[in-house]
Image (cartoon, coloured by chain):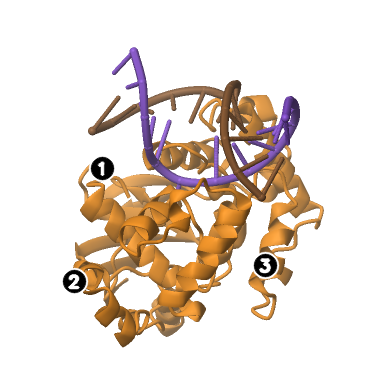
Chain colours: A orange, B purple, C brown
Amino acid sequence: MAVNIHWALFSGQSFLWEQFDIDSNYYSSIVDGMPLIIRQLTSYKIEVYYYTDSIIDHYINGFIKRYLSIDIDNHSVFTDNFHSLYPEVSARLKEYYGLRVIRQNPYETMISFMCAQGIGMHLIRRQVLMLRNTYGEKIPITFSGKEIILHKFPTPESLAAADPLKLSICTNNNRERAKNIVLAARAVVEGRINLVDLRDPEIPLDVLRTTLCKNRGIGFKIADCIALFGLGRFDAFPIDTHVKQYMGEWFKSTTALRNLTPTTYLLLDAEARTFLNPKLAGYGGHILFHCWRKEIKKLRSF
DNA sequence: TCCCAGGCCATGT
DNA sequence: ACATGGCATGGG
């Protein structure tokens, strides 16, 4: 079965998705145990293929729409005040309103973003792919007559039981990162990290961030990424090298010229909320992030 | 060859 | 608090 969805740009936060081939418009992933294939038709439209019984079509449809956060009207993310204050940025953003910040699994988001430290997106994607292929359960499907082997994201148990040294093959040979991933998986298995409890939207962002940062390998930025992409906290605003750059260039922040120390991080976080809707700061920030990478940095990876 | 990539951590001042 | 270096590899 397939469903068409308008207003979806499939890009920007997709370490858990895999492109069929170079320059292919098809992407695959297993979301909540269900194999999904997405075809990017235009920057505003995708087609979703899923494998299930037609009786529960309406349920699947709702599930996918929630996953793709179709409930968020992207044009409401930026205020009228924003458009009049920053007309150049506003003009550039026109092509990027199709981007959806998707509601991904928090555990999978945590592990995959722990791979995203100071290296290019290409390498990050490769690490997550290798983790899936090495430790994830195989799921064979047939798509347009072809047999395709997909892999589930490895369970917390499988990563918790993994040998860190062996796992480091998947983490760019970075042993420290491999060790941290195994430790985090163990913490999930033993209930010391309870991501279900952290889903409570009443938890203040700084508390959420501090809680996640107790784990080795998770700093402010990764914690905010887990909140934004994994816990549906669209108010969380992860600040990385690109965000720091566009805050300096586009929003003339002098704070952005300083090194990204914890203090600077918190100052930038507060600054961003003065020109972005605080409740959707991360959502807007991600649209800006993607636009910055594509338009200014001319990066092709996503 | 050098610098930068969706950072984090330990160490020295 | 802030600066610096190590971690690792690939691409521009």
Looking at the image, which residue is at 81% across and 56% down? A192
Mark pair 2, 1: CA separation: 32 Å
Task: Identify the element where label 2 is drawn.
Answer: helix
- Residue A121 point in image, percent of width and height: 39, 42
Looking at the rendered structure, the secondary structure element under dot 3 is helix
Q: Which mark is residue A206?
A: 3
Asked which secondary structure carries label 1, the reply is loop
Residue A4's place in the image compared with A124, above or below, is below
Could you tell me which chain the residue with mark 1 belongs to? A
Name the amino acid type tagged 1: Asp
Which residue does the numbered mark 1 point to in the structure image? A21
Q: Is residue A50 visible?
A: no
| Separation of marks 2 and 3 at Cα, in angstroms | 33 Å
Residue C11 higher or lower than A4, as above or below: above
Look at the picture and state if A233 lies above or below A209.
below
Q: Is residue A234 left or right of residue A210?
A: left
Q: Amino acid at mark 2?
A: Ala
**Label 1 Cα neighbours within 10 Å, binned few <14 / some 14-19 / many ≥20:** few
Q: State how far apart marks 1 and 3 are (Cα).
A: 40 Å
Quarter of the rendering containing residue A210: bottom right
Measuring from the top left, give residue A227's x and y in whole percent.
Answer: 58, 65
| 2 or 1: tag closer to the N-terminus | 1
Labels 1 and 3: the sequence-earlier one: 1
Q: For mark 2, what is the residue? A: A91
Quarter of image, res A45: bottom left
| Residue A255 visible in the current orientation | yes
